[in-house]
Amino acid sequence: MRRSIRLTGRRQLNQSTFDFRLADVNGQRIAALTISEPSELKAYPVDAEIRVKLSENKLVEVLRFGTIGKPTSTSNLREHSFLAPSCQVRIVNRSDGEDGLLLGSTTPWTYRSGGQPEGILLFQPAAIAPRLWKLTIQDDEGYPTLYIDENLPEASLWARTDPVFTACVLPSVINEVMRRILALEIMPEDGWMSDWLSWASTLMPGSKPPFSGSLQEKDAWISQLVDAFSWKHDLANSVISNVGGK
């Protein structure tokens, strides 16, 4: 199992060491954390705290699950509005003050049913009317999420399978996500941005994203990617076949 040491001395934890879930119990939002591989945490002080940071849009909450020596399995959420939050398990040394010294953490992931991400773009019903859809990008804190108006029946399934929605919305999503990635001006080595670039490379093999290029070069590369996506999924013809036309 791969491990890495960051320059800060913080240790990278594997997400598979933890099983994180959200549930509603008697009107209270509960978070549950199970440590599936306790041996992975033996290197940390027994009094170090186990925390989970949740963030979505501008909402942030940090949950505490006891210590390495005395872990707890549940924690109550103050904020009930989380739908698909970015999650990160953190090990914190409290002896360094209230905020503590971060000793180790997982790479952030986006919560879904079962706590696992589903592809590089997540679809989530939400109360966003009068808008039909809304894209959120949280930089390095989990996969981009496309919120769909919850008033639509089977909103997430409809958004993933309707050819008109796919043809009209997903090219804009790709454009916005890739603009955010290329704004870094350096290729990310891991995380969701790296996964998006790997996906792009399957559509345009050998075409390197122009991180150090001009704005025009970046625009041209993104436009080529959208064209490649549209050709692969035959977007124009799929819409014509669905709504009628020549």
Image: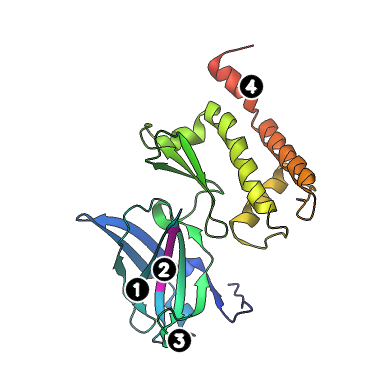
In this rendering, position of residue 123 left or right of residue 235: left
Residue 54 within the magenta-colored segment of the rendering: yes
Q: Is residue 147 above or below residue 67?
A: above
* Residue marked by disc 2: 52
Question: How many callouts does the rendering have?
Answer: 4
Marks 2,1: beta carbons within 8 A = yes
Density class for disc 4 (Cα within 10 Å; few <14, some 14-19, many ≥20) is: some
Give the mark nearest the N terminus, 2 or 4: 2
Give the mark nearest the N terminus, 4 or 3: 3
Between the C-alphas of marks 3 and 1, the distance is 18 Å
- The residue furthest top is 246
State which quarter of the image contains the C terminus. Answer: top right
Residue 149 falls in image quadrant: top left
Residue 177 location (% of width, % of height): 61, 47
Q: Is residue 109 above or below residue 177?
A: below
Marks 2,4: beta carbons within 8 A = no
Amino acid tagged 4: Asn
Density class for disc 2 (Cα within 10 Å; few <14, some 14-19, many ≥20) is: many
In the picture, the disc for residue 96 is 3
Density class for disc 3 (Cα within 10 Å; few <14, some 14-19, many ≥20) is: few
* Residue marked by disc 1: 65
Residue 140 falls in image quadrant: bottom right
Residue at 19% x, 56% y is 26
In the picture, the disc for residue 237 is 4
- Residue 61 visible, this angle: yes
Q: Secondary structure at mark 1?
A: strand
Between the C-alphas of marks 2 and 1, the distance is 8 Å
Between the C-alphas of marks 1 and 4, the distance is 52 Å
Between the C-alphas of marks 3 and 2, the distance is 18 Å
